[in-house]
Amino acid sequence: MPSIPSSGTRVPRQAANTSKESNSRSETSTWRPGPADRTVLDSSGTVVHVPADWGWLPPGDPMWTRRVKTRGPHWVVQEKVGRKVFSRGIWAPAATITEVKIEVDAQRSTASYAAGLAKAAERRGVEQARYVDEFQDAILDFLAFAPKHQSVANSLAIAVAQHATPVGSGTVARTERIPVSQRAESAVIAWLRHQTTAYDHMTIRRQKGVRRQVRRELAEQSRQLLSHYRAGKPIASDCPLRVALEKVKS
């Protein structure tokens, strides 16, 4: 079995030479990656050996993972990197893992399963298209450009939505924790920061709060830029927003 990768995991000194065999086959719990093959760390940093008849199921196939978890004892292995917790896979009886893989693969080979996937993909496509339209409308509401600059508003809304709305993009547009109006505003400001300022080429001190302050200052700069379009003022041909939109079109 492959060893479980561990980014920066260290066994506490007092537990470095302490290990134990797990005799509990009914236990379902969460562990950290261990320092060696077929080992994990408990909450105290003690090295625990995986039962001899257990197998390793790496992350990547949600259907396999869900079914193995429902079949009985299993150990979830997670690792915290920075503020995020990442799944590294699960340990479970090898026979269970094999049984689930055979069962799932057989199900996936059927015509009904393929048809179900096609319908689900179509449904997601419709939902995505609907959301893109909703997001573009929210952007236009936030921009509120004067009628003479409406074409610029339309182009900007399309550009921001194309960048921010794809599934899996990880942008603020994909979160549901804030209203769509706030998502649209944040997405526009982020797009302008990257497309109309020197942010991507700045050398920013690695000091707490400095990058956040720079972002605030650039956000205010972007809001000032938008205010000219809202007021219907004449816009120079070398306006950073117009230049950025021309680059996107090309």
Image (cartoon, rainbow, N blue to C red):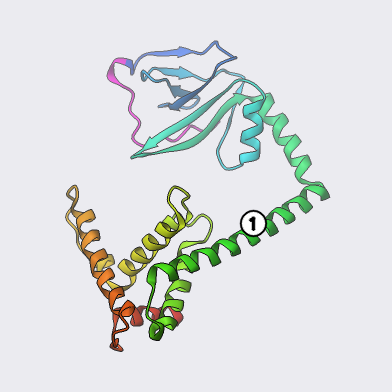
Determine whether, in the image, residue 155 is placed left or right of residue 204. right
Q: Is residue 94 above or below residue 192?
A: above
Q: Residue at x 45, y 24 (%)?
A: 40
**Image quadrant of residue 118?**
bottom right
Bin the neighbour count of mark 1 within 10 Å (Cα to Cα): few under 14, some 14-19, many 20 and up. few
Work out whether residue 193 or residue 51 is closer to the camera in this orientation and state it: 193
Which of the 4 image quadrants contains residue 45? top left
Seen at 43% across and 26% down, the residue is: 34
Task: Provide the major secondary structure of the magenta segment.
Answer: loop
Judge whether residue 140 is colored magenta.
no
Question: The C terminus appears in which quarter of the rendering?
Answer: bottom left
Q: Is residue 84 placed above or below 167 in the rendered structure?
A: above
Read off the residue under disc 1.
124
Label 1 secondary element? helix
Q: From which residue to which does the magenta span run?
A: 1-14
Q: Is residue 13 covered in magenta?
A: yes
Q: Residue at 68% of width from left, 57% of height from top? A: 123
* Rendering coords of residue 163 (x, y %): 46, 66
Horizontal side of residue 111 vs 127, given as left or right: right
- Which residue is most to the right? 111
Of the pair 209 and 107, the residue shown nearer to us = 209
